[in-house]
Image (cartoon, rainbow, N blue to C red):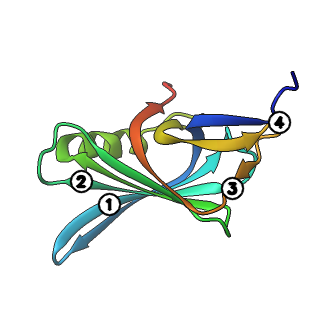
């Protein structure tokens, strides 16, 4: 039986390249804007916007959009305020190595053995879990 040339993955590993804390004063809103390079997928990047959820939800809500015509994914995450504040603080005091993020999706993505992602049509998926790996000094 021939082995398939494709894999299905439900997790995307990313490495933080740039983090910015954006605050707007009227009305007061804040967001984290992250630029991440893809590790588990051969080409592309992810632009992630993280905002506090003032509804005090016990967890987070996340979504990922992967367009078919660009190699830039867009992710949006809503975190409870206390977790948002903690994440912003930790991003300010990161170590010398890059911070890594593992995002788990509610639907599989198809990649070949070289890590090339196949998207047709565009994909919209829920992010069901995030695991941050932050190096210690």
Q: CA distance from mark 1 to mark 4?
A: 40 Å
Q: Position of residue 3 (x, y in %)?
A: 84, 26
Q: Nearer the viewer, mark 2 or mark 4?
A: 4
**Among the two numbered marks 3 and 1 on one chain, the one whose residue lies closer to the N terminus:** 1
At horizontal 32% and vertical 60% (from top left) the residue drawn is 31
At horizontal 20% and vertical 53% (from top left) the residue drawn is 53
Q: Nearer the viewer, residue 81 or 1?
A: 1
Q: Which residue is mark 4?
A: 5
Q: CA distance from mark 3 to mark 2?
A: 26 Å
At horizontal 39% and vertical 35% (from top left) the residue drawn is 129
Question: Outermost residue toward the top?
Answer: 1
**Among the two numbered marks 3 and 4 on one chain, the one whose residue lies closer to the N terminus:** 4
Q: Position of residue 42 (x, y in %)?
A: 75, 46
Other residues around mark 1 within 10 Å, as few (<14) / some (14–19) / many (≥20): some
Residue contact between numbered discs 1 and 4, judged by CB atoms under 8 Å = no
Q: Which mark is residue 44?
A: 3
Other residues around mark 3 within 10 Å, as few (<14) / some (14–19) / many (≥20): some
Other residues around mark 4 within 10 Å, as few (<14) / some (14–19) / many (≥20): few
Secondary element at tag 4: loop
| Quarter of the N terminus within the rendering | top right
At horizontal 22% and vertical 67% (from top left) the residue drawn is 29
**Among the two numbered marks 1 and 4 on one chain, the one whose residue lies closer to the N terminus:** 4
Q: Nearer the viewer, residue 15 or 12?
A: 12
**Among the two numbered marks 1 and 2 on one chain, the one whose residue lies closer to the N terminus:** 1
In the displayed structure, 10 sits above or below 136; it is below
Q: Which residue is mark 1?
A: 31
Q: CA distance from mark 2 to mark 4?
A: 41 Å
Q: Which residue is mark 2?
A: 52
Secondary element at tag 3: loop
Q: Nearer the viewer, residue 121 or 23?
A: 121
């Amino acid at each position: 039986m021939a082995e398939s040339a494709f894999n299905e993955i439900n997790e995307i590993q990313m490495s933080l390249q740039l983090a910015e804390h954006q605050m707007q004063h009227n009305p007061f809103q804040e967001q984290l804007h992250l630029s991440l390079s893809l590790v588990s997928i051969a080409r592309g990047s992810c632009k992630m916007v993280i905002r506090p959820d003032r509804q005090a939800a016990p967890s987070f809500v996340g979504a990922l959009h992967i367009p078919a015509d660009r190699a830039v994914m867009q992710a949006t995450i809503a975190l409870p305020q206390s977790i948002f504040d903690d994440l912003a603080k930790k991003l300010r005091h990161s170590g010398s190595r890059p911070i890594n993020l593992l995002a788990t999706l509610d639907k599989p993505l198809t990649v070949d053995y070289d890590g090339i992602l196949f998207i047709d049509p565009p994909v919209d998926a829920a992010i069901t879990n995030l695991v941050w790996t932050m190096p210690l000094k």
